[in-house]
Image (tube, grey):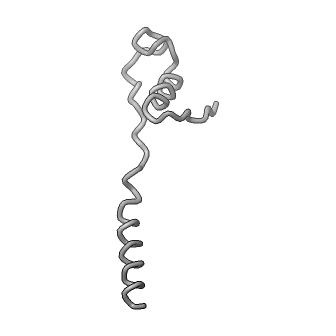
């Protein structure tokens, strides 16, 4: 019984150590790009950042005006 408790504790500690591995990626830097230009695929800075995020993660970020 004591061995089982040690194993469970070890697994919990090991799992907790890797919780931050799948953390969010930083937002792409669009400050140096000109909005609605060809290099930004004719999108606004916010729209282009959402587009890049979708390409990297496969999920759309919510739009908040």
Quarter occupied by residue 61: top right
Number of dots carrying numbers = 0
Quarter occupied by residue 56: top left
Q: Is residue 39 left or right of residue 43?
A: left
Q: Is residue 4 left or right of residue 36?
A: left
Looking at this rendering, what residue extends furthest in the top direction?
38
At 42% across and 91% down in the image, what residue appears? 1
Question: Where is the C terminus found, in terms of image quarters?
Answer: top right
**In this view of the protein, which residue sits in the foreground, 32 or 17?**
17
Residue 60 locus on image (x, y percent) = 56, 33
**In this view of the protein, which residue sits in the foreground, 3 or 65?**
3
At 37% across and 79% down in the image, what residue appears? 7
Residue 3 locus on image (x, y percent) = 36, 87
**In this view of the protein, which residue sits in the foreground, 58 or 45?**
58
At 41% across and 49% down in the image, what residue appears? 23
Residue 64 locus on image (x, y percent) = 63, 33
Check the image and report above or below for 13 versus 52: below
Residue 33 locus on image (x, y percent) = 39, 18
Q: Is residue 38 left or right of residue 50?
A: left
Check the image and report above or below for 64 versus 34: below
Looking at this rendering, what residue extends furthest in the right direction?
65
């Amino acid at each position: 019984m004591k061995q089982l408790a040690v194993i469970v504790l070890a697994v919990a500690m090991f799992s907790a150590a890797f919780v931050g591995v799948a953390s969010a990626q930083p937002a792409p830097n669009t400050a140096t790009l000109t909005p609605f230009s060809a290099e930004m695929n004719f999108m606004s800075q916010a729209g282009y950042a959402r587009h890049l995020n979708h390409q990297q993660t496969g999920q759309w970020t919510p739009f908040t005006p």
